[in-house]
Image: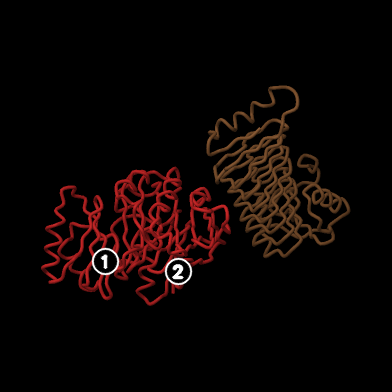
Amino acid sequence: MCGIVGIYLKNHDLEPRLGEFVADMLEEMGDRGPDSAGVAIYRNPAPENGSKVSLFSSDPTENWDRRKAEISSHFECEFSLSVHASHIILSSETPVSLVEPWIRQHWSDLRVMSIGKAIEIYKEKGHPKEVIERFGFRKFAGTHAIAHTRMATESAVTTEHSHPFSTGLDLCLVHNGSLSNHNRLRRYLIRQGGQFQTDNDSEVAAGFLTWRLSQGDSVVDALHSAIEGLDGFYTFAIGSRNGFSVLRDPIACKPAVLAENDDWVAMSSEYRAIARLPDAKHSNIWEPSPAQIYSWGRD
Amino acid sequence: MEFDLTIDALRHVNQALHDCGHNHGDVKPFVIRNPKGRHAVAVGMTHEIQVTVDGHVGYYCGGMNQSANIIVRGNAGPGVAENMVSGSVLVEGNASQYAGASGHGGLLTIKGNTSSRCGISMKGIDIVVGGSVGHFSAFMAQSGRLVVCGDAEHDLGDSIYEAQVFVRGDVESLGSDCIEKEMRPEHAQALDRLLEQSGFEFPVADFRRFGSARTLYNFKIDNADAIR
């Protein structure tokens, strides 16, 4: 099954409540999949030319102060570091092009969850209610977010198998469904230089988008390619720096509901998650058509 | 009698609706408030009662309905009135996937649109949709009638058996073994009655009829009575 939600705030006055909105929606979707949960939130952009990285450590005794001192001294630049349970957000004026390769080379024991300027990804095993509490997510402010609660069907339940999956700078994907050509496609993408952390099918969808974007596609073009390249069932929500997009496969078995009013645009696997939002009753509600790309965002 | 799903447990509400017919005599109409997209609201009804659900519902509202008349003042999620036997379900908004799936009887009316697979495997139910239906509607539909006052998306009536389909607007494409058929007086009469029952005032002459070409399944005219 799995449940996905997304919200984009049109009314900036609501930004302090984004975490609360996403938490309510995701908890409502908890019985669509209690195995793991994750959120990608866009907020507090790094300085111009700078970068922001979300990292995960499986070591509960991790010494983050030591890591911060190490990277700050290497780049001779002050990195700000905030710890949220097993995840940290590392932000600085050093560009992504320098920070990312250094982290991958020197901190190979950590997992890079997201890279960009505004994106932060938090994901863990467990029911969304527990996961949200662990990260203190309700208090987070931001402009938009997408989130996922997983019922594992084809691969293991681990933090790495959880959604959202990073697909590039400030980009990520959540998926409800199952892909049938992911093994062949993963082999193809590895030959194109793609890297995968798991045997999960949704990670292949993310890798497919990463590959198309690296070939110069826009997000919308990459999603058009996905309709051709991915075989299986899916409702995707794709987060980007400026907003989010939604795509369902041409058969559209997997549910999705969209709703919009003057204050926000929201998507969810089911209406009951949207019903938790303020003034949901007075929103325009509809079901996205098959194989059609819907996008919202700031230009 | 009123229920509020922000206060009353859904199981308790459905049970109360199941039990109400045991008290002989007239049963007053029921209203269920604040459904907020909950699943399985007013399912398995077995009595001739009036139930109004005031808001949007999730999966399977009115499922397995027998005898009750259910009105949804909002949108319905997937599988509304699935496997209905008799009675009626009226959705004032739109309905999601597989509305009226497998229904054996009764009348399902949707004032708005439905998404894909409306009336999939229908077995005698009548479905009237005021707007349009999504792809693969009336898929493997066995008997009963699907009336679409708007348009039908691709593959209407794929692998259809003996259900009758009436469409007022455009049909994007017909599925395997589904063809346009002559509208004979008995069809026009039945369609007129269904439109009247469901409160739509479109002229029967606006509609076209579709049904099975009977090349995919083993139809023998001698057995026609068995599938009526």
Which residue corresponds to the image point at 53% horizontal and 58% vertical from the top-left? A258
From the rendered image, report the letter of the chain displayed in brown.
B
Answer above or below: position of B162 versus B20: below
Considering depth in this image, is A288 or B172 the residue closer to the camera? A288
- Decide which of B3, A101 is in the foreground and name it: B3
What's the CA distance linking mark 1 and mark 2?
20 Å
Task: Please state which amino acid type lies under the numbered disc 1.
Answer: Lys
Quick one: SS at disc 1?
Answer: strand
Percent x, y of residue B216: 68, 53
Q: Position of residue A169 (x, y in %)?
A: 32, 69
Q: Quadrant of residue A16?
A: bottom left
Q: Residue at horizontal 53%, vertical 60%?
A: A260
Query: Would residue A41 be found to the left or right of residue A73 on screen?
Result: right
Question: In this rendering, is residue A231 above or below B11?
Answer: below
Q: Position of residue B214 (x, y in %)?
A: 74, 53
Q: Which residue extends farthest right?
A: B185
Label 1 sits on residue: A52
The residue marked by circle 1 belongs to what chain?
A: A
Numbered circles on residues, count:
2
Q: Which residue is the site of mark 2? A: A297
Label 2 amino acid? Gly
Q: Quadrant of the C terminus of chain A?
A: bottom left
Judge left or right: residue A71 versus residue B78.
left
- Is circle 1 on the same chain as circle 2? yes
| Category of crowding for the residue at label 1, using alpha-carbon neighbours closer than 10 angstroms: few (below 14), some (14–19), many (at least 20) | many
Q: Colour of chain A?
A: red
Q: Chain of mark 2?
A: A
> Percent from the top left, x then y, of residue A242?
41, 69
Give the mark, 1 or 2, whose residue is nearer the N terminus: 1
